[in-house]
Structures are given as C-alpha cells and as structure tokens.
Image (spheres, rainbow, N blue to C red):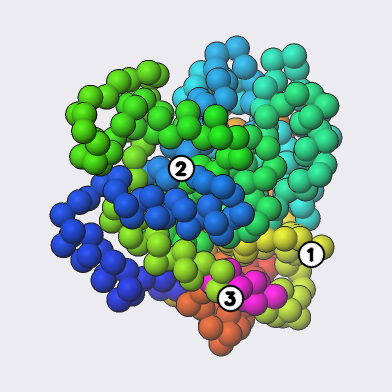
C-alpha cells in the first residue's frame, strides 16, 4: 500500500536510540536540551521547549497566556481536533471561523473579524497543508484588537517565518508529519517570560528537574504553579536530532513532488482543482486536491485503494463532529463544508519517486472516469 504519509527512518535513528539505552538516562537529559537548541536554531529562534505532542504545546501556550473561562479563541474548523481541544482544555470557548476560499483554505480574516466580540482573546492560525497564513495581515488584525496570535504549525516545520507571527507556535512530530519523534512537539515563543512559564508548566511546575537535581548540591525543589506532565524523553529527542538534520532536504523533495503533481494533474485530470494556485511559502505537508462536485468521492477512494493507493480527507470539519456540535451548536461554515466534502489527500512524502507520482495521477484519472460513469448511470 502506498501511504498518504510515511516516516523516513533508518540506521541513524537505530544507532541514536541504542546510544540512549547505553547511556542509562532516558528522559529530559542532554539530548532533549540539544534537540531544543537545534530546533530553535533552524527556526531562527533564541530557544524553544520540547514537549510530548503538539496538542500539549497548544495547551501550554494558551495556558501560559492565561486564557481561560470567559475567553473566546478564534479557530478554524478545517483542522485536526487538537487545535480546538486545546481551547477547551483551558476552559475557553472556541469560535469557529470559515476559510477564505477553496483556493486559499486558510482562515478568512473577514470572517474572523465578523466573529470577534469583547471576549475574544486570541486566534489560532493553522498553516494548512504547510502553506503559511499571511503574517502581515494577521499581525495588523491582531494588534488592532489586542489579540494573541497562536500558530498551530503542525504542518509547517522548517520554515523561518513560523513562530514569528505572535505569541507562540506549536509543532508536531507525530509519525505522519514532515519529521517525527514518534510522538512529540515543540513550543516556539519569542517571549522569554512566556517561554520559562511554559518550560515550568511542562514538568508539573517543578523548579528543577531530576537531571538538574543530580547536577546540583541540593535535592530540593519547589512547585510554584499548577503544571502538567508534558515532558519529552531522550529516545524521542535522539530520533528528533537525526530527523532534524534531514528536514530541509525532505521539505525540498516535497516541494518538487508537489510541483510535479500539479503539472501531471493539470494535464491528466482537468476536472480536478488544487488549492494554493498562487505561489505561497510552504512546507508542503500534504497534497490536497478537490474533486468536481458531481463525483462520488467514496468511489474514487475505493478504486484508488484497490490499486494499492491510500487517500485521506483533510479534514472532516471539526464543527460538524458530535462533541463540538454539542459544545458549539448552530455553526455553519459554507466554504469549509464545501471544501471538506470535495477534498481528497493523495500520497506525499520524501520516499515517493516521479514514476510513483505519475502512477498515482494515472490511477486518479482512471478512478475519476469510472466514478463519473457510475454517477451518469445512476
Ligand atoms: C497533527 C496535528 C496536531 C496534533 O499533533 P500531535 O503531536 O499529535 O498532538 C495538531 N494540529 C494539526 C493541524 C495537526 O495536523
């Protein structure tokens, strides 16, 4: 099966893992610190905080900003549920905002403006599919209203601009992301006070970790705030250090594959449209395409699957799922809903070669013809 996403793992990761085991120190040691330093350097940041997921990173940013009950946070619905859950964790209210268009499926500033109230405190921007939101426009929007910008950067590691929009950015190293630590995440924030607060909150609010106590004369520690256990371990950091060395190269392979897909799909599947027609800075996390309205998407998915090609959907809109319908009833986002009904994500990862990409597009073209015929016959 050709997967939508697959991690690149090999001997260097195995060696790095063995060294951790040989070292006898498994969590929050020198590898976690080295990983933080290397990740910060790649993003032109002074420092960052490694955690055990992007979900934890998002939670810590909102928590560190003091967002809580009575506050509202603007969120997209075209995202993974974690973006919205982080808002619920701190007791704030997520306010869903529609996308700009099928061509630019990022949060619409005009819609965001319409949903602002006196209780709005922050906006979470998702760099959907790796394509960056418009920094200058969002900064103008946020500064006029005194809002925090939080970036859900799960799709966009490796880009210099990510983490510079506002209060902080959350990254994911889950197995299907551009780089992986199996599970893992990072918070980048330019604000040193917020960063130290987040660093404390990552480990129960304890003023020193096990490692620091080993290196210092006193075994004492204090707890100065309510924290969480969102720590990263040495195995993950060791894998992350290896993966990070390849990230720019992998993102470049993704860019080339997306350009190839675009050319092939335009030529061979003329009824398919692709978002982000205009060039835009991207980490090319996924390859979303939009099927024509009359096509039965499930037929296309089934036929590709029969050919050994996995496809997925990014995303089933969050506001339409049971929990969020209960918590935030009556939300209607026509552009998000239309996009999500037609979207199909085709395989994109650094191990895909040009002939494989061609085979995917040929299979897609054939599946579309069959689905159109089935639709006409029905
Ligand atoms: C993967 C993902 C997350 C969650 O990341 P975890 O590391 O699994 O917690 C959050 N937001 C988006 C947009 C994602 O794609």
Position of residue 45 measured from the top left corner of the image (x, y, whole percent): 59, 49
Q: Is 219 on the left or on the right of 146, as rendered?
A: left
Question: Which residue is at 43% across, 66% downward?
Answer: 243
Residue bearing the label numbered 1:
279
Q: Quadrant of residue 336?
A: top right
Using a 10 Å C-alpha cutoff, classify the residue at mark 3 as few (fewer than 14 neighbours), some (14 to 19) or many (20 or more): some
**Toward the viewer: 185 or 49?**
49
Q: Are marks 1 and 3 in contact (CB under 8 Å)?
A: no
Q: Which mark is residue 60?
A: none
Cα distance between the residues tagged 2 and 1:
31 Å
Label 3 beta carbon within 8 A of ligand 1: no
Secondary element at tag 3: helix
> Compared with residue 16, is residue 139 higher up or lower down, i.e. above or below?
above
Residue bearing the label numbered 3:
253
In front: label 2 or label 1: 2
The first of marks 2 and 1 along the sequence is: 2
Q: Quadrant of residue 306?
A: bottom left
Residue bearing the label numbered 2:
49
Q: Quadrant of residue 10?
A: bottom left
Position of residue 315 measured from the top left corner of the image (x, y, whole percent): 58, 48
């Amino acid at each position: 099966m050709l997967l939508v996403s697959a991690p690149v793992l090999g001997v260097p990761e195995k060696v790095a893992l063995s060294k951790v085991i040989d070292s006898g120190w498994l969590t929050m040691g020198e590898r976690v610190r080295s990983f933080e330093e290397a990740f910060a350097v790649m993003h032109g940041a002074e420092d960052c905080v490694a955690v055990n997921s992007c979900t934890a990173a998002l939670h810590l940013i909102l928590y560190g900003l003091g967002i809580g009950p009575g506050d509202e946070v603007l969120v997209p619905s075209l995202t993974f549920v974690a973006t919205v859950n982080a808002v619920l964790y701190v007791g704030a209210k997520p306010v869903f905002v529609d996308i700009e268009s099928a061509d630019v499926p990022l949060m619409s500033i005009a819609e965001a403006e319409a949903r602002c109230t006196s209780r709005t405190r922050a906006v979470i921007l998702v760099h959907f599919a790796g394509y960056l939101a418009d920094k200058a426009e969002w900064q103008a929007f946020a500064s006029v209203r005194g809002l925090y910008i939080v970036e859900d950067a799960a799709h966009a590691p490796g880009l210099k601009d990510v983490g510079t929009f506002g209060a902080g950015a959350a990254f994911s190293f889950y197995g299907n992301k551009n780089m992986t630590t199996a599970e893992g995440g990072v918070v980048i924030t330019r604000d040193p006070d917020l960063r130290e607060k987040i660093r404390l909150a990552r480990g129960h609010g304890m003023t020193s970790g096990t490692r620091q106590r080993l290196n210092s004369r006193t075994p004492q520690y204090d707890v100065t705030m309510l924290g969480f256990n969102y720590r990263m371990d040495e195995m993950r950091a060791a894998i992350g250090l290896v993966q990070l060395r390849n990230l720019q190269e992998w993102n470049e392979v993704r860019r080339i594959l997306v350009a190839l897909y675009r050319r092939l799909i335009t030529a061979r599947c003329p009824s398919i449209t692709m978002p982000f027609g205009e060039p835009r800075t991207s980490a090319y996390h996924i390859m979303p395409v939009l099927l024509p309205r009359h096509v039965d998407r499930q037929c296309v998915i089934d036929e590709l699957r029969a050919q050994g090609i996995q496809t997925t959907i990014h995303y089933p809109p969050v506001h339409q799922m049971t929990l969020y319908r209960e918590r935030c009833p009556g939300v209607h986002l026509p552009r998000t809903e239309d996009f999500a009904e037609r979207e199909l994500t085709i395989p994109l990862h650094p191990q895909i070669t040009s002939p494989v990409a061609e085979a995917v597009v040929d299979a897609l073209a054939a599946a579309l013809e069959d689905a159109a015929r089935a639709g006409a016959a029905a």
